[in-house]
Amino acid sequence: MGTIKLILGFAVMAAVIYGGVMLIPPYFSNYQFEDAIETEARMSTYSTKPEDAIRESVFKKAQDLEIPIGKEQIKVQRFGPQGTGSILIETQYTVHVDLPGYPLDLNFHPTTKNRGAF
């Protein structure tokens, strides 16, 4: 009886470790991507960078992080005059994870809005 519990315990631990190895990287990439778009919004609020250049910068960061997203999925909007207005960057994407017996789609919606100081 003790041997069966030991084998089951190792099997459960292996399943948890495998699940972590498969699920943590997409969440960590999303965290890094959200941080990158927040930084981009903060910097772009006070610059004269056009919306297309901001979109291109966000797209390059997504490609660096291997996030499955296209340029057309990245929405960039400016409100008010450049330097004193606000900027909104939003997107959404799905990452498919194949767990044994349980395929899973993780939906992410990174969004940020930064307002000018004036």
Image (cartoon, rainbow, N blue to C red):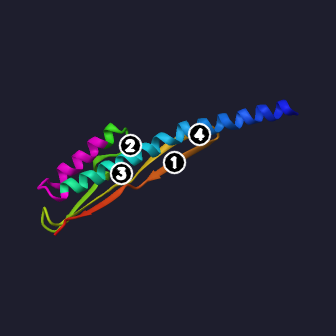
Percent coordinates x, y for residue 36 in the rendering: 30, 48
First reached walking from the N terminus: tag 3 or tag 1: 3
CA separation in Å, label 2 and label 3:
14 Å
User: In this rendering, would 25 be left or right of 64?
Assistant: right
Neighbor class of circle 4 (other Cα within 10 Å; few <14, some 14-19, many 20+) is some
What is the three-letter code of the residue carrying label 2?
Answer: Pro
**Crowdedness of circle 1 by 10 Å Cα count: few (<14), some, many (20+)?**
few
Badge 3 marks a residue whose secondary structure is: helix
Residue at 19% from the left image edge and 59% from the top image edge: 45
Q: Amino acid at mark 4?
A: Gly
Q: What distance separates the C-alpha of mark 4 from that of mark 2?
A: 21 Å
> Residue 68 — which label?
2
Task: Tell me the kind of residue under disc 1.
Answer: Asp
Q: Secondary structure at mark 2?
A: loop
Cα distance between the residues tagged 4 and 3: 23 Å
Gap between marks 3 and 1, in whole Å?
Answer: 19 Å
Please tell me whether residue 60 is drawn above or below residue 37 in the rendered image.
above
Q: Is residue 116 left or right of residue 11?
A: left
Quadrant, the C terminus? bottom left
Residue 19 location in percent, x, y?
59, 39
* Badge 2: residue crowd in 10 Å (few <14, some 14–19, many ≥20): few
**Which residue appears at 70% of the width and 38% of the height?**
12
